[in-house]
Amino acid sequence: MPQAGVVLGLVIVAAKAVPEYAAQINVVILSSTFIYSLVCPSAAKFALVKAGEIKQPDKGRPKNQDTKPAL
């Protein structure tokens, strides 16, 4: 998760810029990063499936069966 390093840098810079709001800035930025890291992978997969960019395997078929039709 490369954004985490950028977020930590942003928290440090913001805390130095406005020290009276440093605690609130820390909570807001770190909490939103945590929520983003939990929600976004699932949301991105859902969006890609809905757009037809990735295919989900059939739920009724075991994964080890060949997908080619029998001749």
Image (tube, helix red, strand yellow):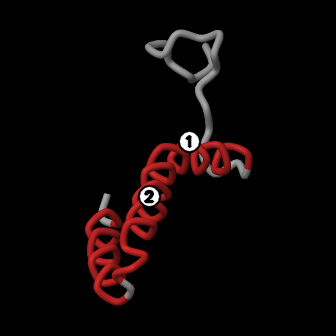
**Is tag 2's residue or tag 1's residue first in the polypeptide sequence?**
2
What separation in Å lies between label 2 and label 1 (alpha carbons)? 15 Å
Q: Residue furthest bottom?
A: 17
- Amino acid type, mark 1: Ser
Please tell me in which quadrant of the rendered image residue 39 appears: top right
Q: Quadrant of the N terminus?
A: bottom left
Which residue lies under the disc numbered 1? 42
Tell me the tag on residue 24.
Answer: none
Q: Quadrant of the C terminus?
A: top right
| Residue 23: image location, x then y, percent | 38, 66
| Nearer the observer, 44 or 29 | 29
- Give the residue displayed 63% in from the left and 15% down from the top: 59
Please tell me in which quadrant of the rendered image residue 60 appears: top right
- Give the residue displayed 70% in from the left and 48% down from the top: 52
| Residue 22: image location, x then y, percent | 37, 73
Measured along the vertical axis of the image, is residue 31 above or below residue 24? above
Measured along the vertical axis of the image, is residue 2 above or below residue 64? below
Measured along the vertical axis of the image, is residue 41 above or below residue 25? above
Which residue lies under the disc numbered 2? 33
Q: Residue furthest front?
A: 20
- Give the residue displayed 61% in from the left and 13% down from the top: 70
In-image side of 2 versus 26 (left or right): left
Measured along the vertical axis of the image, is residue 69 above or below residue 35? above
| Residue 54: image location, x then y, percent | 60, 45
